[in-house]
Amino acid sequence: MASSLLNGAENLTFTRGISRKELGFCGSGFSGKQLPQVSLISCTRLAKTNLVTPKCSLSASRPASQPRFIQHKKEAFWFYRFLSIVYDHIINPGHWTEDMRDEALEPADLYDRNMLVVDVGGGTGFTTLGIVKHVDAKNVTILDQSPHQLAKAKEKEPLKECKFIEGDAEDLPFSTDYADRYISAGSIEYWPDPQRGIREAYRVLKLGGKACVIGPVYPTFWLSRFFADVWMLFPKEEEYIGWFQKAGFKDVQLKRIGPKWYRGVRRHGLIMGCSVTGVKPASGDSPLQLGPKAEDVSKPVNPFVFLLRFILGAMAATYYVLVPIYMWLKDQIVPKGRPI
Ligand SMILES: C[S@@+](CC[C@H](N)C(=O)[O-])C[C@H]1O[C@@H](n2cnc3c(N)ncnc32)[C@H](O)[C@@H]1O
């Protein structure tokens, strides 16, 4: 599947978030065999453009269309009903730090304070705080399906002038050709149909507008892979690229990111592992035609199935709360410059 997604990836560039020396580059799921199919374009804005040459072979992930426990809208809603209380204090410090955020937003090219920006799955506004450093808050709309997450964002002083909308990433309430930038950080993993969300990103952007999707990457270590597969969507890098290209984006680029104390280790996957960008080359809707939505939220869910998914999903989430702590301890113990 991966190689077929990469076929015709003539506009793909891998840009550097962390130096190759720092990165083990084992967890990306790319095999060397696929790399000749990817030609690079230069990226003048960034000092260096780097081709990834990972050592690991491809491992099969579950298809994106086979949702995990929390890759459902209702489950995600209830997950964040409780998580929103501690999200900024417990979740972000282990997975999504301010320096990672700023590095991930850099390819979004937020160079003009008057740009119209939509932050989809904006949650408590952590990423929006990075956006409003470059763009006037009155030009930024935060959309999320969770009123509880949005309530936290509304409390933040720098976001007071932003617009807040409760809505669905797979069915955005913006007109076609509306925004200069589409940003979505850490939300794609909950979308039952990620291709539809990225198609929406394309639709709402103006001609020449840029989408920037920041999200998880798939692990290669067996236990991490198990928990990732049952919990939520951890796409492979080539899946992101395929979704962008199928939606119609050009100049698709992927930048790897990760917490500093991981020293580039990617075998456990990362909740925030890459920033993928693409440019809309023509005005109007996406050339990609899709059938009906994968998930009908108005349909009643069996309460037993829901509860089971919720509990098992929360168990998997606990594993991923522990991973960054384990990596932090390793970083403290193993001498600097040595692989961990
Ligand atoms: C991990 S949080 C990320 C929040 C924020 N972007 C950040 O960087 O901290 C994921 C957010 O995506 C939202 N979300 C999940 N599925 C969604 C959907 N289908 N439409 C809109 N928001 C969604 C959740 O409610 C949650 O607030």
Image: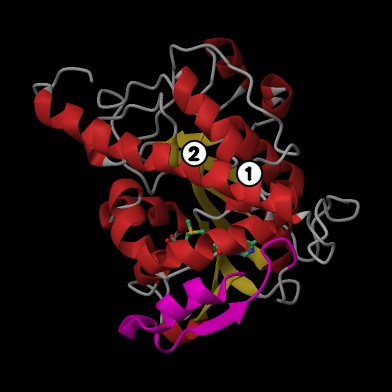
Quadrant of picture, ligand 1: bottom right
Q: Which mark is residue 4?
A: none
Q: Secondary structure at mark 1?
A: loop
Q: Mark 1 = which residue?
A: 69
Are dots 2 and 1 in contact, CB under 8 Å?
Answer: yes
Residue 255 position in % (x across, y down): 44, 40
Q: Which residues are magenta?
A: 145-171
- Is residue 40 in sight in this rendering? no
Residue 296 position in % (x across, y down): 83, 59
Amino acid type of the residue tagged 2 in the rendering: Ala
Q: Secondary structure at mark 2?
A: helix
Q: Which mark is residue 316?
A: 2
Out of 333 and 304, give the one closest to the viewer.
Answer: 304
Amino acid type of the residue tagged 1 in the rendering: Phe
- Is residue 318 in sight in this rendering? yes
The way the protein has been coloured in the rendering is secondary structure
